[in-house]
């Protein structure tokens, strides 16, 4: 199955066939959409000229009442039904959500296994629904502004998002009626926006300080392929925390006492935020809060936020250690997120990395711009030469076959998306179910690979061993999600499962698994050959025992039975003891000879019994 329509080399689509795709940055605080027009990515603004959509949805008893800026207005008057920061809840369980406790004021309810729902006046709302509203708003904006229907979107997610969080994001897109061309890591999108993929090689740091979160990602670029070496950061540190520090100072200055009502708190925070943002441009602002009036200088503010910014730098140091990369190996630092406009942040970042960070693009938009560039390529608006090679499969994906062997279906370094199928058959007569064991790794034996998933194909019509045809398809989509389908071809019974191959496997583990597969290659081949013979031996023993149980007394003499039983016992013993596949192979051949006569007599007998008792007519009718 082809997942993406990618144009053939030299056959770039005609202008009238141009497809429309956008990039969406679905942020914790703000979201935005952008598109490539005349070869350049640009963000799409709403009628008021705003390109940042606050990631906020307000619910009334009727349902969705407002999205974005308008919804933000309900923050003070109706906080429990004004849902913001929903990205923090995506794909998370109740325990993760409870840990966020005091950061989010909502009432949560857990009904089933999945994400906890938010209790609003409109009933229980899932985080996926809230995200879908934001996505829908952005897509509508794009479709109206461009006056086209969209063919798809690239949606960005944090590099550390796990399978469940990515899946939740995809579900939100589906709910919003959007075709997801690809989920793209935010830091990768930022690097693409700066055209760093064209540099081919190098190590890049992406420093992303948004409203509520700080993310640092270390990417390695090899022949145009981005690889995440490490991610780190602080999910509870962002521009909002800077606002709190400043608000605290303002409270003391203005003589307000500590117990503020929510309204006063809001007013203080808004004033702090406004002052902070102004102090990015000028070094002195006047602040008025209720009856109080005063002023704040940039240097005083820097003193207030210094500790918080220093924390982000400590995070950077830790993450670089995880990545095994030293500061002087970093070739570029990209600034992302509104808070990186702050001069103190820029200062500290450039001091730490000893580099002038890349900041010529608007830090709010850079992720969405990169996503738009990627979307444009994925729908085929660029020739194949411009095709970005974004991701490869780090380790082969295989399936367990008889004897604990791994059969590789998709080989490592295949570029995604990719789809491969292979046919298998049943091992026993009348077998109606089959276990599909999905493995990751490049070693020959199942025990040396990593088990990703196991599922059963049931309802195979009973047939003799080897007659059923089971087609197993491995399909890795552009987001690295693996879909495995098993289908029995005569009956069309089907079973499927989705797994995320790289989930939980770090870079060092991948490297180790690969090294093992090289250094053990010879041993593994031996082991594979032995396992194959063991499977053959088991099959033979099984067949002979079944045959003996059925026909021994009628077809064989006592002596012949003893002789065969002895041969079987010897084979069983050798199968357990020998590590030499050739020895076992010879024994199998010998037992085969010993049982030849028995097999011949059974054949005769079965023909006779098939003919017995049937008239000539019956036989002719077949
Ligand atoms: P997110 O990725 O969490 O959605 P953004 O990247 O949109 O967040 O960043 C929002 C944060 O950027 C807010 O805390 C906001 O105050 C801050 N910010 C925006 N403009 C400026 C500015 N000029 N100076 C300092 N901080 C700013
Ligand atoms: Mg962001």
Image (spheres, grey):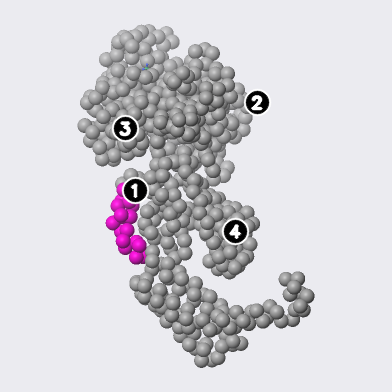
Along the horizontal axis of the image, is 512 left or right of 374? Answer: left
Q: Main secondary structure of the magenta part?
A: helix
The circle on residue 510 is 1
CA gap, disc 3 to disc 1? 22 Å
Write down the region rendered in magenta: 511-527
Between circles 2 and 4, the one closer to the viewer is: 4
Residue neighbourhood size for the residue with mark 4, other residues' Cα within 10 Å, grouped as few (<14), some (14–19), many (≥20): some
- As drawn, 259 above or below 288: below
Whichever of labels 3 and 1 marks the residue nearer the N terminus, that label is 3
Question: Residue under circle 4?
Answer: 458
Residue contact between numbered discs 3 and 4, judged by CB atoms under 8 Å:
no
**CA–CA distance in space, label 1 to label 2:** 51 Å
Q: Of the residues tagged 3 and 2, which is closer to the observer? A: 3
Which of marks 4 and 3 precedes in the sequence? 3
**Badge 3 is on which residue?**
200
Q: Indicate which disc, 2 or 4, sits on the residue closer to the N terminus.
A: 2
Residue position marked by numbered label 2 in the rendering: 62
Query: Disc 1 versus disc 4: distance between alpha carbons?
Result: 33 Å
Whether residue 523 appears in magenta in the rendering, the answer is: yes
Residue found 54% across the figure and 83% down from its top: 598
Residue 429 shows which numbered tag?
Answer: none
């Amino acid at each position: 199955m082809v997942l993406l329509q990618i144009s053939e080399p030299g056959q770039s689509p005609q202008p009238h066939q141009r497809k429309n795709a956008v990039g969406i940055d679905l942020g914790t605080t703000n979201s935005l959409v952008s598109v490539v027009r005349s070869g350049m990515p640009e963000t799409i603004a709403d009628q008021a000229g705003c390109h940042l959509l606050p990631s906020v949805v307000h619910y009334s008893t009727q349902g969705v009442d407002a999205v974005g800026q308008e919804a933000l207005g309900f923050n003070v008057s109706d906080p429990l039904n004004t849902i913001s920061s929903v990205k923090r809840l995506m794909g998370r369980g109740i325990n993760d959500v409870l840990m966020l406790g005091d950061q989010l004021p909502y009432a949560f309810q857990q009904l089933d296994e999945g994400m906890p729902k938010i209790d609003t006046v409109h009933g229980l709302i899932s985080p996926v629904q809230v995200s879908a509203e934001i996505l829908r708003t952005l897509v509508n904006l794009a479709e109206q502004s461009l006056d086209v229907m969209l063919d798809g979107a690239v949606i960005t997610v944090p590099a550390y998002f796990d399978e469940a969080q990515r899946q939740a994001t995809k579900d939100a897109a589906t709910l919003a009626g959007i075709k997801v061309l690809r989920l793209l890591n935010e830091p990768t999108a930022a690097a693409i926006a700066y055209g760093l993929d064209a540099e081919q090689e190098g190590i890049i740091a992406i420093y992303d300080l948004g409203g509520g979160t700080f993310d640092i990602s270390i990417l390695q670029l090899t022949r145009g392929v981005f690889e995440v070496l490490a991610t780190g950061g602080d999910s509870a540190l962002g521009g909002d925390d800077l606002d709190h520090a400043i608000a605290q100072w303002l409270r003391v200055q203005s003589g307000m006492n500590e117990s503020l009502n929510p309204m006063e708190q809001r007013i203080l925070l808004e004033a702090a935020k406004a002052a902070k943002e102004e102090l990015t441009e000028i070094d002195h602002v006047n602040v008025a809060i209720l009856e109080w009036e005063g002023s704040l200088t940039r240097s005083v503010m820097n003193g207030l936020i210094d500790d918080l910014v220093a924390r982000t730098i400590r995070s950077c140091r830790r993450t670089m250690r995880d990545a095994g990369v030293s500061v002087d190996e970093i070739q570029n630092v990209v600034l992302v997120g509104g808070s990186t406009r702050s001069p103190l942040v820029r200062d500290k970042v450039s001091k730490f990395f000893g580099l002038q960070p890349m900041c010529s693009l608007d830090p709010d938009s850079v992720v969405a711009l990169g996503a738009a560039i990627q979307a444009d390529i994925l729908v085929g608006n660029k020739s194949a030469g411009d095709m970005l090679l974004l991701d490869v499969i780090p380790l082969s994906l295989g399936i367990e076959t008889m004897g604990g062997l791994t059969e590789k279906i998709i080989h490592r370094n295949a570029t995604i998306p990719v789809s491969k199928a292979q046919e298998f058959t049943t091992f026993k007569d009348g077998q109606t179910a089959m276990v599909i064991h999905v493995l990751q790794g490049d070693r020959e034996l199942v025990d040396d690979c990593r088990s990703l998933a196991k599922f059963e194909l049931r309802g195979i019509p009973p047939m003799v061993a080897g007659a059923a045809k089971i087609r197993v398809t491995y399909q890795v989509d552009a987001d690295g999600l693996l879909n495995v389908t098993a289908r029995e071809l005569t009956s069309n019974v089907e079973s499927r499962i989705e797994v995320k191959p790289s989930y939980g496997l770090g870079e060092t583990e991948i490297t180790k698994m690969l090294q093992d597969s090289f250094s053990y290659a010879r041993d593994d081949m031996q082991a594979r050959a032995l396992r194959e013979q063991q499977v053959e031996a088991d099959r033979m023993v099984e067949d002979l025992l079944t045959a003996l149980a059925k026909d021994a007394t009628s077809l064989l003499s006592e002596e012949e039975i003893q002789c065969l039983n002895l041969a079987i016992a010897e084979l069983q013993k050798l199968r357990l003891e020998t590590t030499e596949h050739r020895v076992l192979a010879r024994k199998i051949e010998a037992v085969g000879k010993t049982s030849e006569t028995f097999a011949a007599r059974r054949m005769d007998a079965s023909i006779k019994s098939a003919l017995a008792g049937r008239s000539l007519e019956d036989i002719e009718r077949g």
